[in-house]
């Protein structure tokens, strides 16, 4: 049975079932996020499903983006990767309705769900239950998990193979466990907002995006170093229209250099 616990309307993360909404959302009270000036707001899965729907968009061969319309909470998109070894969902959306389940099942279901960082944990336990698959969360971010589930696997180290040909890499920065997904066969890097594609088709590296707090230069240099061995030509970040479709590896390298120059004055 799915969790019918209250959902934070600001970040979209679900909490365990309770008679009344929680008093606090720990994710929003962290300085990387925020509590609205009017105070903490909550919704339920039923309310969400009556006001929103999920849409699917083809992005590249084997790669689909899924977003909620109208936009809800942070407004991120998730990605469905269809590979010869199985299907992977990168990040989650809060809304999981019957239409979404039927569409994904029709595309082959899910073999794994991979989360980039806590802001996008959303209703990940419901997704794992619906598709009977494991959830992969970087162990450094385990304290941010709000709903426990036996399907959650806390992976450790710098990288992990999820399915043959699909790897995740922990870069840190935005969160200790902030990660990216690498799909070498398609030369694709899914960055979430571990690094964010900017309107000028470069990349930014932030500790807090809504509060405009940048990462320090040494951390950005470390992120760039960890990306250096990976081969990719396109990069897709967490929001619609925020992708680099050509020569993304060079662009991200130059973006890291630009970030560090700006911090040095």
Image (cartoon, helix red, strand yellow):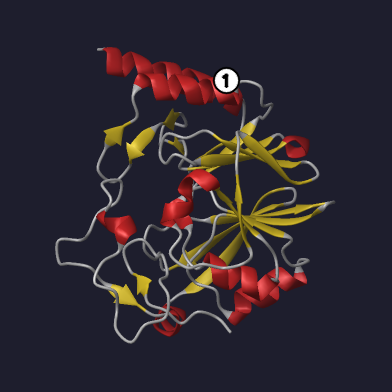
**Residue at the farthest right position:** 84
Tell me: 4 left or right of 190.
left
Where's residue 192, x and y in %?
Answer: 51, 45
Where's residue 95, x and y in %?
Answer: 49, 72
Q: The C terminus is located in which quarter? A: top left
- Determine the residue positioned at 61% across, 20% down: 228
Using the image as rendered, state which of residue 108 and residue 244 is in the foreground.
Answer: 108
Using the image as rendered, state which of residue 232 and residue 225 is in the foreground.
Answer: 225
Q: How many marks?
A: 1
Where's residue 225, x and y in %?
Answer: 55, 20
- Determine the residue positioned at 70% across, 65% down: 133
Where's residue 161, x and y in %?
Answer: 72, 42
- Determine the residue positioned at 39% across, 83% down: 47
Q: The N terminus is located in which quarter? A: bottom right
- Determine the residue positioned at 39% across, 19% down: 218
What crowding class fits label 1: few (fewer than 14 Cα within 10 Å), some (14-19), or many (20 or more)?
few
Is residue 114 depicted above or below 54 in this figure?
above
Tell me: 261 left or right of 3.
left
| SS label for mark 1 | helix
Is residue 196 depicted above or below 202 in this figure?
below
Tell me: 44 left or right of 184.
left
Is residue 237 depicted above or below 249 in this figure?
below
Q: Which residue is mark 1?
A: 250
**Would you identify the image quadrant in which residue 196 lies?**
top left
**Would you identify the image quadrant in which residue 111 lies?**
bottom right
Is residue 259 depicted above or below 9 in this figure?
above
């Amino acid at each position: 049975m799915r969790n019918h616990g209250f959902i934070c309307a600001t970040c979209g993360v679900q909490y365990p079932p309770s008679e009344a909404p929680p008093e606090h959302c720990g994710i929003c009270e962290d300085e990387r996020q925020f509590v609205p000036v009017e105070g903490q707001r909550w919704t339920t899965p039923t309310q969400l499903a009556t006001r929103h729907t999920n849409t699917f968009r083809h992005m590249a061969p084997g790669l689909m983006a899924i977003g909620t319309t109208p936009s809800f909470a942070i407004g991120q998109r998730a990605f469905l990767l269809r590979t010869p070894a199985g299907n992977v969902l990168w990040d989650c959306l809060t809304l999981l309705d019957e239409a979404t389940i039927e569409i994904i099942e029709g595309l082959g279901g899910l073999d794994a769900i991979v989360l980039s960082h806590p802001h996008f944990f959303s209703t990940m336990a419901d997704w794992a239950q619906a598709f009977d698959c494991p959830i992969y969360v970087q162990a450094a971010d385990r304290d941010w998990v709000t709903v426990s589930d036996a399907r959650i696997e806390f992976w450790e180290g710098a990288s992990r193979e999820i399915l043959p040909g699909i790897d995740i890499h922990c870069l840190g920065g935005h969160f200790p466990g902030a990660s990216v997904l690498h799909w070498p066969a398609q030369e694709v890097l899914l960055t979430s907002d571990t690094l964010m594609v900017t309107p000028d088709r470069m990349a930014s590296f932030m500790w807090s995006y809504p509060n405009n707090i940048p990462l320090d230069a040494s951390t950005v240099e470390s992120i760039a170093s960890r990306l250096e061995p990976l081969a990719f030509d396109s990069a897709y970040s967490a929001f619609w229209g925020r992708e680099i479709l050509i020569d993304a590896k060079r662009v991200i390298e130059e973006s890291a250099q630009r970030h560090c120059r700006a911090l040095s004055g």
